[in-house]
């Protein structure tokens, strides 16, 4: 590419703006603005923005991996190829999880077996320690299997014990996905000292500053009478929340939403927190 280019020259290579479905409420939370009868109205995008790289962050047990797996399963069931880089959990455990998820979502598991390609970085230290080795393997998979979606769970696992390099490593993988025109999900881990609902994760804001958008997942234990009264939930229960912290590609709902993880491990986004507190459907 030239050192500089007129904006109009980029038209032929600019990605189309449409949603890649997750089949959750997230598909309605990203939107575009259209003119109708002289007024500007919101139109749901129908998924995460095509060819975007979205960061999903939160403390442990907030549903990050479940959401990433749900996205992969839905896309595979729709016939699209997904590359799943498993950094935290060995690949056989991912197989078991996706099989259960396909049952809960009434998906065709044979399609998932055919359309999801797995790189097991959890059991291969070279993939975790040497980004170039992992990238070469990812490139082979993308070209051989005609991949259109990539999930890395988690990107944090690729800079463990070297958080000073977080920005550099995240940038390498972000640019790689852009170069290969992939729609991507990066799962990132929070440290316990970080704000539960901020986009900050291990490595600081390295991930959030580089990616196209961030989804923050949180949980709050109802551990006082005040919280029990506020949320109308028994003491000891858990309130789960999700929020799109930002997106540079398209508009988004920036409210905090309440969600549940069903017994089958499915992420079900229910309603805005403000409505939940007012006594809506719980």
Image: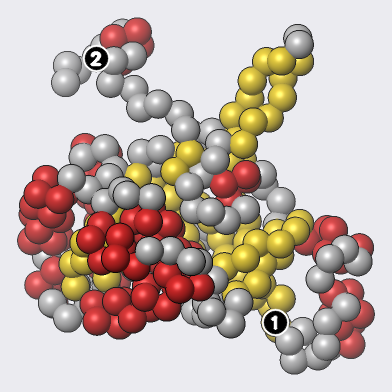
Residue 183 % position (x, y) = 35, 45
Q: Residue at x 56, y 36 (%)?
A: 45
In the picture, measured across the screen, residue 28 lies left or right of residue 249, that is right
Q: Residue at x 68, y 15 (%)?
A: 35
In the picture, measured across the screen, residue 70 lies left or right of residue 162, that is right
Q: Which residue is mark 2?
A: 4
Relative to residue 236, is residue 255 depicted above or below? Answer: above
In the picture, measured across the screen, residue 37 lies left or right of residue 228, that is left
Residue 126 % position (x, y) = 9, 72
Q: Earlier in the sequence, mark 2 or mark 1?
A: 2
**How was the colour assigned to the protein in this rendering?**
secondary structure
Which image quadrant for residue 234? bottom right
Element marked by disc 1: strand
Label drawn at residue 238:
1
Which image quadrant for residue 135? bottom left
Q: Nearer the viewer, mark 2 or mark 1?
A: 1
Label drawn at residue 140:
none
Q: Quadrant of the N terminus?
A: top left
């Amino acid at each position: 590419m030239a050192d500089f280019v007129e904006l109009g020259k980029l038209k032929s290579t600019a990605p189309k703006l449409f949603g890649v479905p997750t089949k959750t409420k997230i598909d309605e939370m990203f939107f575009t603005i259209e003119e109708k009868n002289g007024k500007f109205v919101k139109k749901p995008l129908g998924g995460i923005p095509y060819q975007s790289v979205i960061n999903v962050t939160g403390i442990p047990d907030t549903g990050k991996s479940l959401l990433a797996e749900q996205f992969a399963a839905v896309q595979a069931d729709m016939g699209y190829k997904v590359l799943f880089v498993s950094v935290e959990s060995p690949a056989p455990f991912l197989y078991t999880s996706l099989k259960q998820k396909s049952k809960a979502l009434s998906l065709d598991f044979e399609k998932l077996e055919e359309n999801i390609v797995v790189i097991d970085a959890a059991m291969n230290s070279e993939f975790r320690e040497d980004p170039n080795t992992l990238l070469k393997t990812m490139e082979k998979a993308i070209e051989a299997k005609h991949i259109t979606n990539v999930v890395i769970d988690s990107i944090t696992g690729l800079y463990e014990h070297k958080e000073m390099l977080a920005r550099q490593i995240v940038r390498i993988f972000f640019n790689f996905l852009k170069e290969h025109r992939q729609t991507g999900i990066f799962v990132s881990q929070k440290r316990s000292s970080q704000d539960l609902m901020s986009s900050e994760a291990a490595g600081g804001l390295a991930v959030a500053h580089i990616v196209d958008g961030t989804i923050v997942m949180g949980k709050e234990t109802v551990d006082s009478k005040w919280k029990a009264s506020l949320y109308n939930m028994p003491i000891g229960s858990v309130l789960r929340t999700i929020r799109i912290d930002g997106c540079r590609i398209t508009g988004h709902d920036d409210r905090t939403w309440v969600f549940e993880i069903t017994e089958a491990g499915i992420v079900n986004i229910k309603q805005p927190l403000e409505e939940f507190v007012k006594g809506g459907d719980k």
